[in-house]
Amino acid sequence: MDLRPIGVFDSGLGGLTCVKRLRELMPGEDIIYLGDTGRVPYGGKSRETILTYARQDIAFLRRHDIKAVVAACGTVSTNGIEEIAGDYPIPVCGVADAAAAAAVRRTRNGRIGLIGTKASIRSTAYDEKILALMPQARIVKRACPLFVPIVEDGRIGDGDPVLELVAREYLEELKKADVDTLILGCTHYPLIAGTIGRIMGPQVALVDSGAEIAALVKGRLEREDALAERRKGTCSYFVTDSAEDFAQTASLFLGVPVEGSVKRVTLGEAV
């Protein structure tokens, strides 16, 4: 048993969908969440900048004596998280590996779609992970840069006219390619999965990267006998921009009111 918390970070609030899944699967775990809201989004940044930010995020989380890190950010997970994971004495898990494996398990025709930030789509990480498991797979990718601000603006209802217009344009190419599996390559996207799923059709399986990484982390902690055995864990929240509006927006991602305090922190010196 290991009572230390799990650290989770994202460029903004999307990683809270991963926190939600972690709490569902492992209600006894304490979780430390860091949302780098002052520098969101990471998706338009260079690879070097993304990794610098990731190191700063992990450095902050490690101040809390965590037992594992979840990079709940598709952009970080597809831009070299493996390169820096070995620098730490604790597991550092990204969402891409788990989501790629799930997509390969679920596809029937070998046509796998991927939507994500510009940086995630520009990267070949998902391609490499999928093709290593299924060399004959055909991968169709589409950057969806407007989805993050739409979600964070709260326009997540199925039928919202702005979301509907943008989603139909983004997903048209994937529909034409006859993909039967679609990876939601950003942890914001599960909040609009209803709209995405309706547009794509019931024949397309959606892969929630947050849910898949939560299952992966639970399995790893079980194998290492590191699960906490307390009845109910706690969550602590940190952001790098204003904390005042966090609770209201975060409740959209968590599906419940935010419990506990929200603190603003500075990461510049945490390298």
Image (spheres, rainbow, N blue to C red):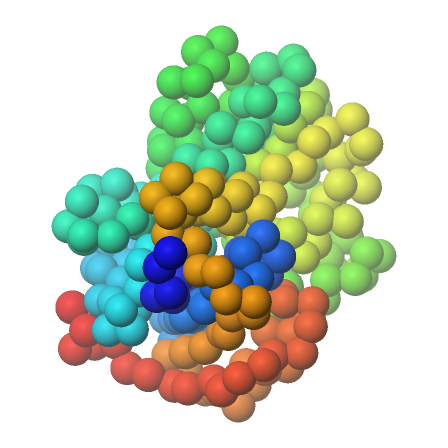
For the point 62% across and 33% down, the residue is 182
From the viewer's side, name the closer residue of 90 and 17.
90
From the viewer's side, name the closer residue of 2 and 73.
2
For the point 58% across and 81% down, the residue is 259
Q: Position of residue 98 (x, y in %)?
A: 47, 36
The N terminus - image quarter: bottom left
The correct choice, above or below, for 59 with respect to 218 in the image is below
Can residue 185 be seen at all in this image of the molecule?
Answer: no
Q: Quadrant of residue 204?
A: top right
For the point 67% across and 78% down, the residue is 257
Instruction: Check the image and name the residue furthest to the top.
Output: 136
The C terminus - image quarter: bottom left
From the viewer's side, name the closer residue of 90 and 200.
90
The correct choice, above or below, for 173 with respect to 150 in the image is above
For the point 35% across and 66% down, the residue is 4
Q: Position of residue 187 (x, y in %)?
A: 54, 53
Q: Position of residue 159 (x, y in %)?
A: 84, 57
**Relative to residue 86, is residue 80 drawn left or right?**
right
Instruction: Tally the marks.
Output: 0
Q: Position of residue 61 (x, y in %)?
A: 30, 68
**Relative to residue 95, is residue 255 drawn left or right?**
right
**Relative to residue 143, is residue 239 drawn left or right?**
left
Can residue 87 be seen at all in this image of the molecule?
Answer: yes
